[in-house]
Amino acid sequence: MTEIFLPRCQPFFWPLQPEAFTACSKNRALEILRGCKALVLALCLLVLAGCASQKSDGSYQLDESLKATGKNSRIDIIVLHYTASTKPSALLTLTNRDVSAHYVVSDDSKPVVYKLVDENLSAWHAGESSWYGRTYVNPRSIGIEIVHPGWSRNSTGDVGPLYPAAQIDAVIALTRTVAQRYGVAPENIVGHSDVAPLRKQDPGPAFPWKKLAQAGVGRWFDEAAAAKYQAEYVRNGPPDAGWFQKQLKRVGYNAPESNYFDANTLHTIAAFQMHYRPELVNSKPDAQTAARLRALPTNGSGL
């Protein structure tokens, strides 16, 4: 049995002579009585709470009266995707096959947000993935699919079909709400291409990451610093492969450590460009890409 110790009520003494019992002492006595009543009430509530928190199925007793302070949310990443299909096709696929997402944001004139998976469950949306060294992000992430026809990788700077403004507003509102609910940091609001750069390219270069960051949803680079770094790299040449690989790891990507521009590194550079240099996604480790990478904060946002 748990023992609970309460502070002793301070005693008070009646004076020997009635005329000595002043208004002041009466008030003091009433205060002390009220204090004792409050302690008794608190004790009763504590006992009742303890009883309510105990459950049993016959083989053991479950006590839920104590709560640990050393904990955080299971969710710490939000991954944005595009469907590369129409809304009917996307909803059919995401509800009837071994792929899913927590939410789908439609491209209707007034967007509809479909909730397909409860947030306390894992959706099958990211697949083989990594972010800041954390692999297979499905169990720790919320997946948001955005209805969009998709994009084909090219080297001409063509970003593909634009996202409707109303749809992006809905994505911002939904993502902000989820991020606030779980305390998701700006640098952990990412695209599928960020966490799986060798396989995926959604939500593509048409997705307005800067607009999201300006709305407090996601991360962006320090543009003034990037301009300064770019001038430096134009004069002296861009950094080598080892530098790019280290910097990509610094900002979250799963980059190789080969010290040369292998195919995996070039795919990862393209993923970075889709997010932070969408006007030209060409996989080239040029001065502008290096400057924006260097100006991207490790935590939070550069805005």
Image (cartoon, rainbow, N blue to C red):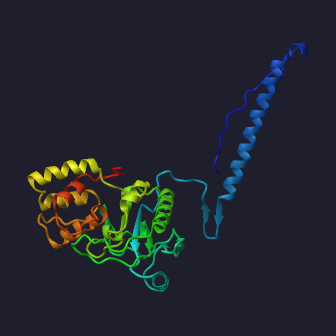
Q: In the displayed orientation, state which residue is furthest to the left.
A: 236
- Asked whether 224 or 268 is in front, the reply is 224
Residue 116 image offset from top left, x and y in percent: 52, 76
Residue 198 drawn at (x, y percent): 25, 74
Q: In the displayed structure, does residue 59 sit left or right of residue 289?
A: right
Residue at 75% from the left image edge and 43% from the top image edge: 41
Q: Give percent across and percent down for residue 174.
A: 50, 64
Residue 16 as seen in the image, left or right of residue 118? right
- Image vertical order of residue 8 relative to residue 86, above or below: above
Q: Which of 27 and 293 is in front in this view?
A: 293
Q: Is residue 118 left or right of residue 188?
A: right
x and y percent of residue 71 in the render? 47, 55
Name above or below for residue 42 compared with residue 149.
Answer: above
- Of 35 and 140, nearer the camera is 140
- Quick check: 13 left or right of 258? right
Q: Which residue is drawn at 73% across and 27% down?
A: 10
Residue beneath the point at 24% across and 56% down: 292
Numbered marks: total: 0
Q: Which residue is at the front of the view, 12 or 225?
A: 225
